[in-house]
Image (cartoon, rainbow, N blue to C red):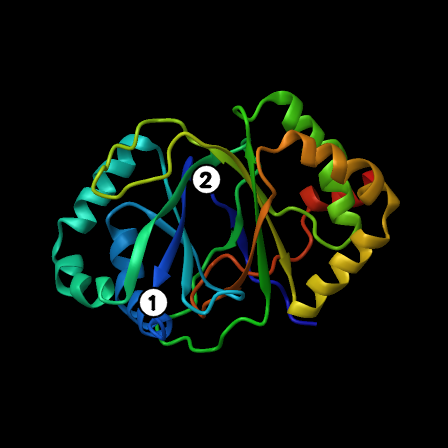
Amino acid sequence: MDQAPPTILDTSIVIELRQYRLHPGKRNALIDLFEQSLVEPQEAAGMRVLGQFRDKDDADRFVWLRGFRDMPSRAEALQSFYGGPVWKAHRSAANATMIDSDDVLLLRPVDARSGFVLPKERPSVNASQVASSLILATMYLLPAPVDDDFKGFFESRVAPLMAAAGAPPIARFQTEYAQNNFPALPVREGEHAFVWFASFAKAGDYDRHLAKLRESRSWTEAVQPQLARRLKSPAQVLRLEPTPRSLVRHARETNWTAEFTRAR
């Protein structure tokens, strides 16, 4: 059996979940440009590129995540990168692929242990093998800010059932309410979001996960109706395929996710 690569907990305090609507047929061009020319320069400017994905259900959508130490460093890093020579050299080519890039959730980890556990090393710029894994991003919009009651409900009721059905949460985030301190890049405002992620070794594992949930009376008759009543709108689920250089990809079971399996 192959040994798992060394990993480390990402400690970013501020996370951007970015969804881009692209011109038809332009996604691969943007991904190639992004992975070859825009990852390391962003990180050199002080941010962390966490994950890049193809939306499995929308051929013209690119989704990615980046993290920052805090809000002040976010402003500094974004100014450094977008005001610097690398973006100047590539912005026309990047922008030519995009219809809209303003669908952005500004988030923060739910607690100190709820960020992503990531490989210590990123695949090289020459990496070409597309990951076979699938990342699931589930977004709950609430009528009010996430509070201890909702967190407790998720931790004690939702997460154990997800873990038992093969989708233990690998990261959880909620809205960061600090004012957007780089207004040149808009973010969604006036929303109360709770976003959690799961991973699957292959797409078929997600189908088996859904089948197990449908068979779970605890989910269908108790927890799912209770969850629906707590939400402002139906949950949005993104099925995401990691690009060759994405750090966020399928995670082997961690001690955190194992806790939910034992609890179940």
Q: Secondary structure at mark 2?
A: loop
Q: Quadrant of the C terminus?
A: top right
Tags 1 and 2 touching, CB below 8 Å: no
Front one among 2 and 30: 30
In the rendered image, the vertical position of residue 40 relative to residue 190, given as above or below: below
Which residue is at a point 82% across and 36% down the rendered structure image?
A: 222
Q: Position of residue 102 (x, y in %)?
A: 32, 48
In the rendered image, the vertical position of residue 221 relative to residue 179, given as above or below: below
* Visible residue check, residue 190: yes
In the rendered image, the vertical position of residue 118 relative to residue 256, given as above or below: below
In the rendered image, the residue lying farthest to the top is 148
In front: label 1 or label 2: 1
Q: Secondary structure at mark 1?
A: helix
* Visible residue check, residue 202: no
Label 1 CA crowd tier, 10 Å (few <14, some 14–19, many 20+) = some
From the image, tell me which residue sits under label 1. 35
Q: Which mark is residue 11?
A: 2
In the rendered image, the vertical position of residue 28 relative to residue 249, given as above or below: below
Q: Looking at the picture, which amino acid does disc 1 mark? A: Glu
Q: Quadrant of the N terminus?
A: bottom right
Q: Which mark is residue 244?
A: none
Residue 141 picture quarter: top right
Taking the image as shown, residue 86 lies to the left or right of residue 46, namely left
Which of the two discs, 1 and 2, labels the residue nearer the N terminus?
2
Q: Position of residue 63 (x, y in %)?
A: 43, 57
Which residue is at a point 30% across and 52% down the rendered structure image?
A: 43
Which residue is at a point 36% across and 49% down the rendered structure image?
A: 48
Label 2 CA crowd tier, 10 Å (few <14, some 14–19, many 20+) = some
